[in-house]
Image: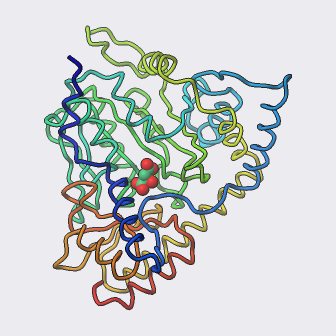
Amino acid sequence: MIKANKYYGDLEKSYLFSEIAARVRRHSEANPEQEILRLGIGDVTLPLAPAVIAALHEAVDDLASAERFYGYGPEQGYPFLREVIAENDYRARGIDVSADEIFISDGAKSDTGNFGDILAGDLTVAIADPVYPVYRDTNIMFGRKDSMIMLPCTAENGYTPSVPDQPCDLIYLCSPNNPTGAVMSRADLRDWVDYALANQSLILFDAAYESFISDADLVKSIFEIPGAEHCAVEFRSFSKSAGFTGLRCAYTIIKKITLINDGNGKMVPLHDLWLRRQTTRFNGASYLSQRAAAAVYTPEGKKEATAAIQYYKRNAEHIRSTLSNLGMAVTGGDNSPYVWARIPEGYTSWEYFDYLLKNFGIVVTPGSGFGSCGEGYVRFSAFGAWETCRKAMALISKSRDQ
Ligand code: MLT
């Protein structure tokens, strides 16, 4: 008899952002005249950069030409993209990553979610609380609900997870952090790498928001930390760095020297397992999105991507300073597109979400959706239009409850 994966029964009924979208839709239908100010999901609002659009047009022409037509591409991604990533994002910063250690995909969400495919089921998993729900939910789907070690990230520890005092096999770290906007220091990351090496653990490092780091002392890649090449995988995305949330393109770095126990005691390259997984289950990101992503590394592409990041950072600064001037405790928003704000006494996160939506049409993300330590907070995304941020902050400034 066919049966479902029973672990799906351990999940919340719907995914956080689907639940928010449904609530906003219902509210809009009931209040069609109210303007909705979206500072909820981290979805970009600026159009793709001109250099990216030009590359897309050229790529479409390639697909229209019998001589230059592209069918299936390499599952790992086209060399033209992998080369520019290795050169610009790593070697130019003194980090040793080669093109064949890069796997192009359609998103960091799918890569971080799918990574469990190549790992054993009976692992202990360290996950921050609050956390990007994909890490938590996909581990629940793999049946690891009871073997998750939640790492509280609170005002007391600067919203930074500390190494646990017990061994743990798999570790998810995200810096700049979604949802808190906190950025882990070099010393914090060194602690984690040392811990992973000592415990033969694997760190899955989500660097999807690294392009928002402007402080030169902060770490953008886990591979800046000596030893990480033996115990870490890094995930990056063009979604937030170049506005590809609709176009889709991301990449994952697995160093060839990273080894993992094959389940029978033999150490094998993790890279080979992921390659085997990807070649079997994935036919690569589209030629169009990869050509578009390569354009991000041209001189114009770099300039335009930087301008877009600056635009969102201005939003973040405006949100952060407005809330802070109102006396709300806030973190993030400086080297990150997310501002994490303590809500007024007397509300739960979902109640404050409802309050902002019903009274002002403002959409945020309730902190408790990211984990129990997120209760009492909401997350503001800086990816909205400037005008949206400005209006939302003006309304909150005038509101009864800040
Ligand atoms: C978020 O709002 O947390 C992100 O946009 C979700 C994602 O990247 O999948």
**Front in this rendered view, residue 49 or 266:** 49
Please provide percent x and percent y for residue 315: 52, 72
Decide: is 137 above or below 355: above
Which image quadrant for residue 167? top left
Is 25 left, or right, of 120 in this rendering? Answer: right
Left or right: residue 70 compared with residue 94: right
Is residue 174 something one can see in this rendering? Answer: yes
Closer to the camera in the image, 265 or 228? 265
Q: Residue at x 45, y 79 (%)?
A: 34
Q: Quadrant of the N terminus?
A: top left
Residue in the foreground of this view, choosing between 168 and 382: 382
- How is the protein colored in the picture? rainbow
Quarter residue 105 falls in? top right
Percent position of residue 361, x then y: 41, 77
User: In the rendered image, which quarter is residue 67 located in?
Assistant: top right
Residue 326 shown left or right of residue 111 in the figure: left
Q: Relative to 81, does residue 37 appear above or below in the rendering? A: below
Point out the image quarter for the C terminus.
bottom left
Residue 99 image point, x, y percent: 62, 27
- Residue 16 vertical placement versus 117 (above, below): below
- Residue occupying image coordinates x 74% and y 25%: 70
Q: Is residue 177 something one can see in this rendering?
A: no
Residue 53 percent across, percent down from the top left: 74, 50
Residue at position x 60%, y 43% in the image: 93
